[in-house]
Amino acid sequence: MTERLVIDDSSTPKLPRHAKLRFDKPRDKWIILAPERVFELDEIAYEVVSLCDGERSLVDVVDVLATKFDQAPREAIHTDVTAMLQGLADKGFIVS
């Protein structure tokens, strides 16, 4: 059994090698495509996942989003992004 990945401020999230971020024209949505699995992303989830390149830390991702969405409190962005990435990590769609 593999150990659970816990997303924290020092994590450098990215998609695993077997998963690809793609725009699906028939669905008119961004998706994460993995073997025998598809995960649909809404606009905000796409904004977050597109920044997860394995180079940026969670804090870096939050900083970019806080600048882009300056009307939202940074702490709320941090909480939401951490929860979203943890959920994706629990499903195997994010590694660090």
Image: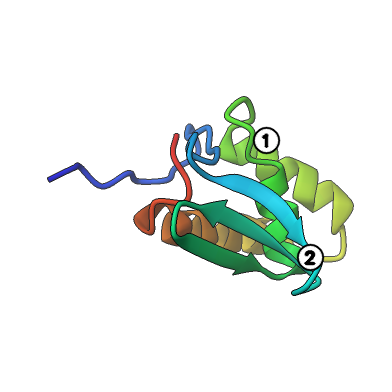
Instruction: Give the amino acid at mark 1.
Output: Asp
* Render colour scheme: rainbow
Q: Residue furthest bottom?
A: 27
Q: Position of residue 62 (x, y in %)?
A: 68, 46
Q: Residue at x 81, y 72 (%)?
A: 28
Residue 22, placed above or below residue 30? above
Q: Residue at x 57, y 29 (%)?
A: 54
Q: CA distance from mark 2 to mark 1?
A: 16 Å
Indicate left or right for 48 with 23 as reference: left
Q: Quadrant of the N terminus?
A: top left
Residue 61, placed above or below residue 93? above
Q: How many marks?
A: 2
Indicate left or right for 73 with 12 as reference: right
**Quadrant hosting residue 14:** top right
Name the element at disc 1: helix
**Which residue corresponds to mark 1?**
60
Instruction: Give the amino acid at mark 2.
Output: Ala
Between circles 2 and 1, the one closer to the viewer is 1
Q: Position of residue 51 (x, y in %)?
A: 70, 41
Nearer to the camera, 74 or 11? 11
Q: Are marks 2 and 1 in contact (CB under 8 Å)?
A: no
Q: Residue at x 51, y 54 (%)?
A: 85
Q: Is the residue marked by circle 2 packed among few (<14), some (14-19), or many (20+) residues within 10 Å? A: few
Nearer to the camera, 7 or 78? 7
**Quadrant hosting residue 74:** bottom right
Q: Position of residue 6 (x, y in %)?
A: 35, 46
**Quadrant hosting residue 3:** top left
Number of the label disc, if any, that sits on residue 72: 2
Indicate left or right for 42 with 81 as reference: right
